[in-house]
Amino acid sequence: MPPSAPSNAVTPSTSNTTNEVPTFGSNHDDDAPPKITIEDSGQVLVGAQGSYCYNGTCADTIGPVDLVITDHVNYQTLKSAAFTVQLGVEATDVTVDQLTSKGEPVCSIIPTKVSATTYSGTLCNTDNGNYLLSVGEQFSGGDSSMVIPVIVDSLQQ
């Protein structure tokens, strides 16, 4: 770890090989950042944990493309261009960027707040292909990011 890194910096786990949906409550690790998921037409899409600062613990991760590969996260097919972002805690700001599978920016999606922990958005590029959705949230006391790999193929309108 570089000398300039904070003493409480950690390397995030890379064990998301099962794409399990995260849960909260008594089973939630208070030291782990809140999870971010995307819901699309009734399916829950999960991704790889990105950089975060939470409860005094900060972790930097590798870039989105390498993060998806390292965490063995599978691309998941979107059924619709519209989706919902589910957050683990109330956010003060949410960002969603659509990237190519190589990590190149396609566009920024402006999410609409639905509730304290729910935002909605719509893909800005619906051309068939593989994309990464990079979701970030800021909340009281920290921030968190997640990369969710998706496949766009003949979306429902």
Image: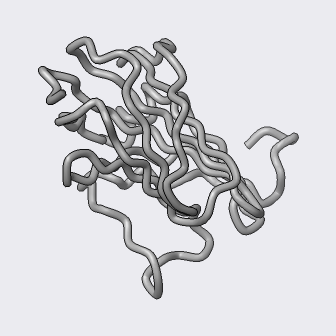
**Among all residues in the image, which is located at the extreme bottom?**
26
Q: Which of these two is toward me, 52 or 71?
A: 52
- Which percent across, then down, holds residue 120? 43, 44
Look at the image and tell me in which quarter the N terminus lies: top right
In the displayed structure image, the side of residue 114 where residue 38 appears, left or right: left
**Among all residues in the image, which is located at the extreme right?**
4
Image colouring? one colour
Q: Which of these two is toward me, 34 or 40?
A: 40
- Which percent across, then down, holds residue 100? 39, 16
Q: Residue at x 22, y 34 (%)?
A: 80
Q: Residue at x 69, y 62 (%)?
A: 54
Q: Residue at x 54, y 28 (%)?
A: 63
Q: Is residue 32 above or below residue 130?
A: below
Q: Is residue 61 above or below residue 109?
A: below
- Which percent across, then down, holds residue 144? 61, 50
Look at the image and tell me in which quarter the C terminus lies: top left
- Which percent across, then down, holds residue 111? 52, 38
Q: Is residue 136 above or below residue 22?
A: above
The picture quadrant where one finds residue 33 is: bottom right
Q: Is residue 108 above or below residue 25?
A: above
